[in-house]
Amino acid sequence: MSEILPSAGTVVYEVELEADSAIEAPFDTWLRDHIADVLQLPGFLSAEVLADAVPAPGKVRRTVQYRLGDQAALDAYLLNHAARMHASGIARFGDRATERPRSLVQREEFIRGKVSTENCLNCGEVLTGQHCSHCGQRAKVRVLSLWSLLRDVFGDLTNFDSRLWRTLIPLAFRPGLLTQDFLRGKRASYTPPFRMYLILSVAFFLLAQLGNDPGSALKFNVDEEGGANLQLAPGGADGTATDAATKATPQKRTPDTGDTPADSKAPAPRELTADEKKLVDAIVKRLPAKEQARARRDMEADFAKATPEDLAAVRKIMNDPCGEETLKVDIGPFGEKYEPRLREACRKIVADTPSFGRALFENIPKMMFIFLPLIAAVLYVLYLGSGRYYVEHLLFVVHYHAFFFLGGITILLLELLASRTEGTGAGTAFKATEGLVTTLFVLYIPFYLYRAMRRVYGQGHIVTLIKYSILGVAYLFSLVITGVGLLFYTALTL
């Protein structure tokens, strides 16, 4: 009785024959001639005879495996020739020999060195080639040595036809092309978008840390009105600063209009007391090293002319700049429970401002994972009815910010080269190039976004400009919201 299975490549037709051991020699002679006759028929490719090493007592057993090209050839044999071939054996040996045929369809073929395992090590799917048909993982699994890994990375960097360069060039100079191609299904030629974003963002933040200590950009100041300020100075070196935190003003001084009454005039300059010098030291040590000498001179001159009330206000701030008398915290009724934690965080910031700066910098990537989905949600609303899924807008935002990081990396590299070659002709050239590239990049950013929106969403100039303007406002608003959240999160997790 034969079992016919569905075709899936070549077919094995197996016949199991058993005969009395007394007729073993003539039976084997007949079998060889019989196989030769069968191989003359259409579709038969080869045959193999197997002997049972431990047959039943008084019997010999032979298994013949015929390989045919396909199921159709076997069907033709069973229909037209099988009965005749079977009859020849019965006519020769009668009931002293029997046969049991069956057919097998080839499922897999394993060749040494071609396929590493029967099942995919990632998803368990049966392997039929060099890659899994289900998840795409390569059949041969090997652990790369460090040298092999570095060689692969170096090859990607130096081979201008590699997927890395095929991704970075359109990312920089063809706004929206990567998103457009990805949505159209052209993906294997480029680095996956989220992987590219992670690589570029990590490279950007690493370079930013190499160039400057993020904590050095923050400083604690006492302003001219006796108020305490936590300020963020870009670069931490030029002395300029933007107000980045709440301001405490315990006492307002009367502006000097030139007509101040005689009894409230500031005293003439005098020599500072030891206590006042300690106060100056306590303030100056919180400033960047480059600014301390100038700040000390200015502060000593101011203190020498200050009134006792002014000095008392400064001492109160320096003793506890985050206390209730010096720092007013107004975060609404829902945030009252966080006020003690914020004051404690404020004291930690004052005690170690650079550490807060570093923590703030390190939390920026976390903020981006909230900021990007917010911008994608804005795009989703702007393009309602376009039939696009939310994730398509998120992909657009990821590509845009990957471009932003790529530009930032270029500027940081030029800045790093300029600082390493400062005082030389090359340093001057790098500095000038950095300034030029920074200017061009700042001008290119808004055009890039507009052009990318036009390419990906395919709407006219007027409609795109309107949505571009709305997106710009929403972008700034989201940036402020997530920035404030970043400050609070960093302060509360110190």
Image (cartoon, helix red, strand yellow):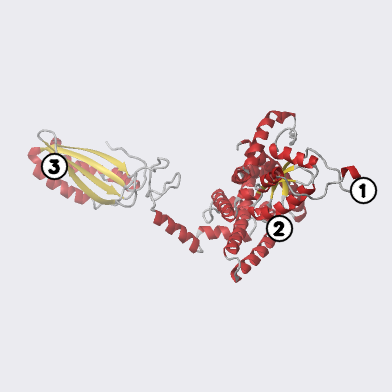
Q: Where residue 256 sits in the image (x, y, percent)?
A: 87, 48
Q: Few, some or many C-alpha atoms within 10 Å of disc 2 (few <14, some 14-19, many ≥20)?
A: few
Q: Read off the residue under disc 2.
A: 447
Q: Given the image, on which type of amino acid does mark 2 rest?
A: Phe
Label 3 with label 2: CB-CB less than 8 Å: no
Distance from the alpha carbon under mark 3 to that under mark 2: 92 Å
Q: Read off the residue under disc 3.
A: 92
Quarter where residue 415 is shown: bottom right
Distance from the alpha carbon under mark 1 to that under mark 2: 54 Å
Residue at 64% across, 36% down = 345
Q: Earlier in the sequence, mark 1 or mark 2?
A: 1
Residue 174 appears in the figure: yes
Q: Given the image, on which type of amino acid does mark 3 rest?
A: Arg
Q: Given the image, on which type of amino acid does mark 1 rest?
A: Asp
Label 3 with label 1: CB-CB less than 8 Å: no
Q: Where residue 123 sits in the image (x, y, percent)?
A: 42, 41
Mark 1 against mark 2, which lies toward the viewer?
1
Q: How many marks?
A: 3
Q: Secondary structure at mark 1?
A: loop
Q: Read off the residue under disc 1.
A: 259
Q: Earlier in the sequence, mark 3 or mark 1?
A: 3
Q: Secondary structure at mark 3?
A: helix
Q: Earlier in the sequence, mark 3 or mark 2?
A: 3
